[in-house]
Image (tube, rainbow, N blue to C red):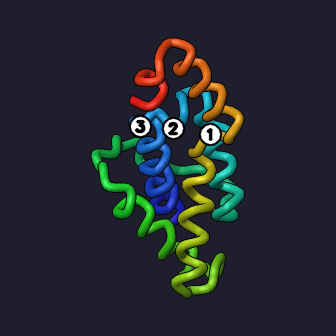
């Protein structure tokens, strides 16, 4: 069971890497945050690369696991809040988004919004 949830978390981290939400040097910090969220004491993965591209398909088993393990109540509201929490680990802080926007805007408005 441990390997299954770790593989599911790894798919989410792979999604973050593939979509430039996180960088390779963020891996262990992000992994530790997910281990805390899922109350895991050790990390075991199969090492297989993820080919999943749809974020909903990646998040669903993680949310189902959290419900099954009683980490969250099995309600629509709790599920929505939990997937937001999981994505929040991958999402840059507002100051980082604004700094990137300003940097690109200095080049052109198209660069900032494209």
Tell me which label, 1 or 2, sits earlier in the chain. Answer: 2
**Within 10 Å of the Cα at label 1, are there few (<14), some (14-19), or many (20+) other Cα atoms?**
few
Residue linked to disc 1: 92
Residue linked to disc 3: 19
Residue linked to disc 2: 21
SS of the residue under disc 3: loop
Query: Looking at the picture, how far across and down is residue 48, in whole percent?
Result: 35, 43
Q: Is residue 15 above or below residue 41?
A: above
Query: Looking at the picture, how far across and down is residue 111, in whole percent?
Result: 43, 21
Picture quadrant of residue 77: bottom right
Query: Looking at the picture, how far across and down is residue 26, in whole percent?
Result: 61, 32
Name the one closer to the observer, 96 or 21: 96
Q: CA distance from mark 2 to mark 3?
A: 6 Å
Seen as rendered, the residue at the extreme top is 107
SS of the residue under disc 1: loop
Contact (Cβ within 8 Å) of mark 1 with mark 2: yes
Q: Which numbered dot is residue 10?
A: none
SS of the residue under disc 2: loop
Q: In the shown orientation, is residue 103 left or right of residue 11?
A: right
Name the one closer to the observer, 107 or 36: 107
């Amino acid at each position: 069971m441990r390997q299954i949830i770790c593989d599911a978390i790894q798919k989410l981290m792979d999604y973050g890497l593939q979509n430039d939400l996180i960088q390779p040097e963020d891996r262990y910090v992000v992994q530790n945050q997910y281990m805390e969220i899922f109350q895991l004491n050790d990390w075991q993965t199969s090492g297989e690369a993820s080919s999943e591209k749809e974020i909903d398909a990646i998040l669903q088993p993680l949310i189902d696991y959290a419900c099954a393990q009683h980490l969250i109540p099995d309600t629509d509201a709790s599920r929505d809040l939990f997937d937001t929490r999981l994505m929040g680990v991958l999402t840059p802080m507002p100051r980082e988004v604004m700094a990137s926007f300003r940097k690109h805007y200095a080049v052109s408005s198209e660069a900032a919004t494209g």
